Amino acid sequence: MLLWFMLLVSGVFGQKDMKEKLFAFPKDSPTSYVQIHPECTGPFWESTICMRLHLSLMTQSCVLFSMSTKTNVNSIVLFYYPGLRNRFQQVVDYKHQYYDLKDKDFTEWTSMCVTWDSSVWGLFIDGKYYKVNKTSNVEISGDPIINIGQWQSQYRGFYTSLSFVGEMTDVNMWDKALTDANMMDYFADNEMNGNVINWKALNYTLHGEVTIKPYVDPYPCVPI
């Protein structure tokens, strides 16, 4: 009974199927984020993170995803810089790669995957692939803390000025670099479920003003 009460208070509800649900981040706040409790903890020599999202603010840079360990607060971080910069930044073990997105923005629902291994880093957005040949012998080890919506400036701490404002759904993570075909399956909504973060069996804790709402596919496939 005590354990049940502690879980209820903390916001951890065990594995929940989040299909047709989303996380809503209503406003800029240093205390609003979702902590994800991963199904496996590494070590990681490669990975892929996929999600669907849209932003409510286009004037503010934000963090979409942040993973830290006790020895590495920048294990994996995904940044977006809107406006004139209009760039996406991928950070793995303090190494980083920028992608210039030109006319692309995230005010409409967008599907994206970010991947890396020892030789290739890539960003896949709505079927367009930004691929970079990049030698990167990285091993991420130690118990990971994973958050969406905030950047962890220290292990179990938060950076206050890069809050995500918008909605996010279908967040999955794998401990491998997915193939192009795998990522296209994700974009086609072919039930691609991660083995590190599985949206259909998600362990999470809500913090601040983040809420759960129904998700309706804005671009449903219509049979011909």
Image (cartoon, rainbow, N blue to C red):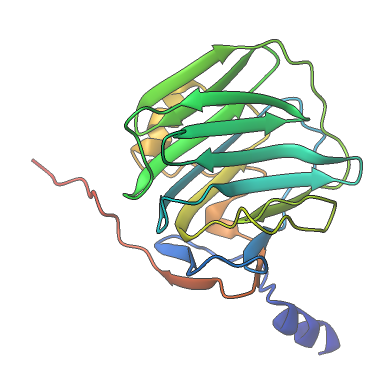
Residue 60 in view: yes
Badge count: 0
State left or right for residue 210 relative to residue 111.
right
Q: Residue at x 83, y 58 (%)?
A: 156
Residue 208: horizontal and vertical position, in percent? 63, 74
Rendered view: 3 above or below 109? below
Q: Residue at x 78, y 50 (%)?
A: 153
Using the image as rendered, state which of residue 125 and residue 191 is in the foreground: 125
Using the image as rendered, state which of residue 187 and residue 57 is in the foreground: 57
Q: Residue at x 79, y 45 (%)?
A: 68
Q: Residue furthest right?
A: 71
Which quadrant would residue 205 be assigned to in this image? bottom right
Rendered view: 74 above or below 29? above
Residue 183: horizontal and vertical position, in percent? 45, 30
Which quadrant would residue 174 be assigned to in this image? top right
Q: Residue at x 26, y 54 (%)?
A: 218
- The quarter in which the N terminus is drawn is bottom right
Q: Residue furthest front?
A: 84
Residue 14: horizontal and vertical position, in percent? 67, 69
Residue 172: horizontal and vertical position, in percent? 56, 45
- The quarter in which the C terminus is drawn is top left
State left or right for residue 70 relative to residue 91.
right
Rendered view: 191 above or below 45? below
State left or right for residue 98 relative to residue 204.
left
State left or right for residue 218 relative to residue 197.
left
Residue 203 in view: no
